[in-house]
Image (cartoon, rainbow, N blue to C red):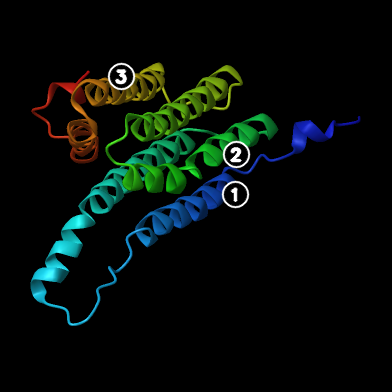
């Protein structure tokens, strides 16, 4: 009995998880490397250094924003993988698509930090978040459709995963809308607060109970 190669290729979930861990680690490292030590002309003073560090505030803020964004997406993918019984070739390529979009975060983070006041920079960063959310949502939908989800994972698991992604993307979209109206800083602060909600998940907060 012959077996097609595509039926046996890329079935290991461990390899997907390992590649994901490595890529996320690199992306998280690259975003902090964009915060460079300021160059001051001697003689230097504490006030000069403090002023130079203050000028780096947008880079520190975008670093926090992106580190939390990457952490949330990494945790989301790991959660999905934990409820799968096996992989296949299509799932591997969808996961690679997800990781390819994740790999753009160092670029969009640096762009936002460099042009913090420009709405186009904020829009491209939000588009990176949106595309990543679409990719991880599509990966889970495919896993359900292809029967890759573990038998002991009830339908409530799938609903919770889909709901989490949709709510997060809606809030990120609201953050972008805030940026269009009020500017980048309020938008970034709002998105960071949204991320803190999903990271800390306070039990009293209604978004974590729906």
For the residue carrying disc 2, how many other residues have a C-alpha within 10 Å: few (<14), some (14-19), or many (20+)?
some
Residue drawn at x 18%, y 36% is 189
Which callout, 3 or 1, points at the residue further toward the start of the chain? 1
Which callout, 2 or 3, points at the residue further toward the start of the chain? 2
Residue drawn at x 34%, y 33% is 122
Q: Residue furthest right?
A: 1
Q: Which mark is residue 147?
A: none
Residue drawn at x 17%, y 82% is 43
Q: Which mark is residue 15?
A: 1
Per the image, label 2 sits on a secondary structure element best described as helix
* Placement of 155 over or under 202, stated as above or below: above
Q: In this rendering, does residue 8 appear at all?
A: yes
Per the image, label 1 sits on a secondary structure element best described as helix
- Judge left or right: residue 102 versus residue 114: right
- Judge left or right: residue 201 versus residue 11: left
For the residue carrying disc 1, how many other residues have a C-alpha within 10 Å: few (<14), some (14-19), or many (20+)?
few
- Judge left or right: residue 61 versus residue 28: left
Q: Nearer the viewer, residue 111 or 60?
A: 111
Asked if labels 3 and 2 touch by Cβ distance under 8 angstroms, the answer is no
Q: Nearer the viewer, residue 99 or 13?
A: 99
Q: Quadrant of the N terminus?
A: top right
Q: In this rendering, does residue 86 appear at all?
A: no
Residue 65 screen position, x and y as percent: 28, 43
Residue 8 screen position, x and y as percent: 76, 37
Q: Quadrant of the C terminus?
A: top left
Q: Which mark is residue 170?
A: 3
Depth check, mark 1 against mark 2: the one in front is: 2
Residue 20 screen position, x and y as percent: 51, 48
Per the image, label 3 sits on a secondary structure element best described as helix
For the residue carrying disc 3, how many other residues have a C-alpha within 10 Å: few (<14), some (14-19), or many (20+)?
few
Write down the residue under mark 2. 96
């Amino acid at each position: 009995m012959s077996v097609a190669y595509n039926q046996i290729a890329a079935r290991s979930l461990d390899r997907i998880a390992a590649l994901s861990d490595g890529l996320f680690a690199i992306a998280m490292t690259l975003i902090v490397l964009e915060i460079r030590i300021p160059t001051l002309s001697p003689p230097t003073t504490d006030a000069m250094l403090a002023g130079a560090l203050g000028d780096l505030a947008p880079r520190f803020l975008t670093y926090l924003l992106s580190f939390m964004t990457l952490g949330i997406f990494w945790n989301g993918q790991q959660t999905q993988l934990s409820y799968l019984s096996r992989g296949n070739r299509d799932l591997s390529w969808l996961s690679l698509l997800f990781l390819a979009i994740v790999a753009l975060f160092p670029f969009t983070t640096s762009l936002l930090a460099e042009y913090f006041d420009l709405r186009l920079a904020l829009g491209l960063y939000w588009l990176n978040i949106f595309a990543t959310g679409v990719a991880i949502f599509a990966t889970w939908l495919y896993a359900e459709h292809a029967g890759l989800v573990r038998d002991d994972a009830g339908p409530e698991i799938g609903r919770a995963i889909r709901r989490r992604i949709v709510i997060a993307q809606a809030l990120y979209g609201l953050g972008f809308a805030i940026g269009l109206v009020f500017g980048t800083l309020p938008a970034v602060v709002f998105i960071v607060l949204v991320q803190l909600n999903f990271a800390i998940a306070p039990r009293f907060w209604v978004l974590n109970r729906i």
